[in-house]
Amino acid sequence: MIDPIMRDAESKMSKSVDHFATELQTIRTGRANPALIDRIMVPYYGTPTPLNQLAQINAPEPRLLVVQVYDKSQIGAVEKALRTSEQGLNPASDGQVIRVPIPPLTEERRREYVKLVKQKAEEARVAIRNVRRDEIHRIDQLQKNGEVAEDESKRASVRLQKITESQIEKVDGLATRKEHEVMEV
């Protein structure tokens, strides 16, 4: 009765950690990374579409991204979307590919990105704690219904807390690594 709840909780918490890791990829560091711009929305025939579905994005150099748009008629729209994004980029097109130089970050901008990393880490921790709360509620319901003994319920709560702590440690580790990447000059 308790084991499926534990597996379910661990699965949900792992998904929160995975989502956090994906979110971190979109936060800019000093190096060019295709994940930096792959979620920028481009109006494609009236429909907002992520850039990674419209183009191939490469990082041939540490400070340069190259965007090869599949539909050449959309190069202007992609270039405009890159220019108006919050990333502060200045793309240049030659009609075939779009080159996006990645400017170095200022100290102030680096600190803003570190704050953003901390904010996203806290959101991930809250999501993990919410899973714990929901699963403890399920265990309590089972106990009230007489399907689980009280001591088994308490043991399950302790196991759930250990799972929660291990997932939060993963989030903290990812956040620390990203902070160091962002502050690296």
Image (cartoon, grey):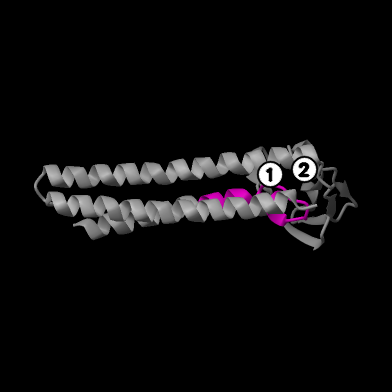
Residue 43 at least partly seen: no
Mark 1 and mark 2 residues within 8 Å of each other at the beta carbon? yes
Q: Which of disc 2 and disc 1 is earlier in sequence?
A: 1
| Residue that mark 1 sits on | 40
User: In the rendered view, does 79 fall on the left or right side of 7?
Assistant: right
Location of residue 22 with respect to 87 vertically, above or below? below
Q: Which quadrant is home to the N terminus?
A: bottom left
Which sits in the foreground, 134 or 99?
134
Which sits in the foreground, 5 or 101?
5
Q: Amino acid at mark 1?
A: Ile
Q: Residue at x 26, y 50 (%)?
A: 157
Q: Position of residue 143 (x, y in %)?
A: 14, 46
Q: Amino acid at mark 2?
A: Leu
- Give the class, few, some or many, for how many residues have Cα within 10 Å of label 1's Cα (few <14, many ≥20): many
Q: Position of residue 86 (x, y in %)?
A: 73, 37
Q: What is the residue that sits farthest to the right in this orientation?
A: 94
